[in-house]
Amino acid sequence: MTSSTQRLTVGQALVKFLAAQQVERDGESSPFFGGAIGIFGHGNVAGVGQALLQYRKDFRLYQARNEQGMVHMATGYAKQRNRLGALACSTSIGPGATNMITGAATATVNRLPVLCLPSDIFASRRTGPVLQQLESPFSWDHSANDAFKAVSRYWDRINRPDQLPTALMEAMRTLTSPADTGAVTLALPQDVQAEAWDFPTLLFRPRTWFVPRARADRAALRRAAQVIAGARRPVIIAGGGVIYSAATAELAEFARRTGIPVGVTQAGKASLPWQHPQMVNAIGASGTAFANKLAHDADVIIGIGTRYTDFTTASNTLFARPDVQFVNLNVTEPDALKESATAVVGDARESIVELSELLAGYTVDPDYRAEAERAADDWRGERDRIVGMSDGATLSQEAAIGLVNEAAGDHHVVINAAGSMPGDLHRLWRPSDPKAYDLEYGNSCMGYEIAGAVGNKLADPTRDVFCLIGDGTFLLANQELMTAVQEGMKITVILVDNFGYGSIAALSETRGSQGFATRFTYRAEDGQFSDERVPIDLAAGAASLGADVLSASTPHELRAALSEAAGRPNSVVIYTKVDAKGRFGGSGAWWDVPVPEVSELDSTQEARKEYDEQVAAQRLYL
């Protein structure tokens, strides 16, 4: 007879539990955890580290080079798995733990499940101060890991082995919740990791967590249908919730039948095929003038799975009609209620289906349908013009994006995060399917790109993974390129060199700060930054991490490099120099970045005048 308990250490019980967890939605079941990522230090090498060694055949460990990078890897994995899978991240105490905080914040902002397992100071207090321990003058129970509280959806510290079972169950509840998911942090004192206890055998049984499709309140659906039925110029804003709920087909049919145009956020970029007649593409501050004109004049905004960030709303200036109304379909109540909307709280797919039934027979006027379809067609034509390739001596960033998109094929994923490329990709990229576009723009986190690409490849090895990264971000976080090489995972990195922080340089210029301290230049004899560039060999840096490196500085060279990279089994970095000032027109929308009210600089004074004009259009939707 099987014993009712098993004597295990906390580390062993943790790993054994994680390996037994399954997740199921719509009748499809799979292991929830794809393994662990770790960097060992004195806080975890003999605790969780020993457990990962002991159970290595059942629960794979991946090495990382940077703790922030490991959480980004887990975030990319969770995104590609549609939030139906996660990775566990193990670190030592002190700096190893706190390095994860930015990654945890990024996962939580993007509502993606990641399990953070930072080691902690001795619970017994027999040893202290511990190496890398942050000593608190007011509590022995306060450590650096308390900093995770602000960036975690669930946080706990395991000070005794018998606390682990309930903490694990709460962790799984959070990780598998469509509404409450994000980073989960279980702080593990290094002595407790090694302590043994008689754990209930039932804790380790195979357990399936069923991800529900919450149905919305029928009265709320009827109220929403009534608002939409009275609309003459409605616009749908599709966010990431459409993709995570696998509602893309339902959205496509709803838009086709009603004729309502669909603008997409960064997270919702791939929620509608780019060829769809109602797909007016990117909306907001990083959107297109075509989509934003429709949103500006809309009488009803239907937000589906969006949380209305400042980029989406153009800092609350985009929706200009005095009588504009909002209808929001969202699985989380706070997001459904944003902009004083008629709120429909429920799963996006089920809500679209039920709302569609209530709106049977509704369609927009033929003139408006035609206007929206012209806007979609006009943008597609403008996009092709912008990315049109030439045989010139220089390469623009938008032309580079077009060439990479052309080479990406019909089963790809593109990864990017902060800088100027997210805006260009939002407008220009054509995803092959709903999981083909991973732009970390919820937290706009520099350093996500390569690690996120590795996570995407772990989640779906069959996809061709393309990572676009700028020179500034590459200098910040390139270490996980070695992880891809180590694991034999093929990713293609397009390293775009525009000689500094190009995005912020452009923003600085428009806000009156003259691009100050945004380029990689030497300091001159007068003590100020000069125009002489520091000669950084980024290609050599990429090669030192084990990747194959190719170079391109013209459209012809980039096309050839992409073709050659496709035939190589190893990860490839294509070092690409682009015209630092070669940018195309904007979105016609505004973004609120305050300019000083007083200044001695003429450039700042002029920028403030423009800012005052723009901020006057800002409003609260009450």
Image (cartoon, rainbow, N blue to C red):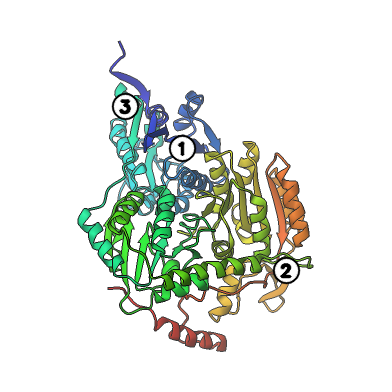
Disc 2 residue crowd, few under 14, some 14–19, many 20+, Cα 10 Å: some
Element type at marker 3?
Answer: helix
Disc 1 residue crowd, few under 14, some 14–19, many 20+, Cα 10 Å: many
Q: Is residue 121 left or right of residue 41?
A: left
Q: Is residue 465 left or right of residue 200?
A: right
On the image, the x and y values in percent for residue 51 come to 45, 27
Residue at 27 percent of width and 48 percent of height: 215
Element type at marker 1?
Answer: loop
Kindly identify which residue carries mark 3.
203
Give the CA separation, mark 1 to mark 2.
42 Å
Question: Which one is nearer the viewer's eye here, 507 or 537?
Answer: 507
Kindly identify which residue carries mark 1.
43
Q: Which mark is residue 90?
A: none
Residue at 50 percent of width and 87 percent of height: 599
Residue at 70 percent of width and 39 percent of height: 569
Q: Earlier in the sequence, mark 3 or mark 1?
A: 1
Kindly identify which residue carries mark 2.
533
Q: Quadrant of residue 500?
A: bottom right
On the image, the x and y values in percent for residue 21 come to 38, 31
Q: Is residue 620 left or right of residue 288?
A: left
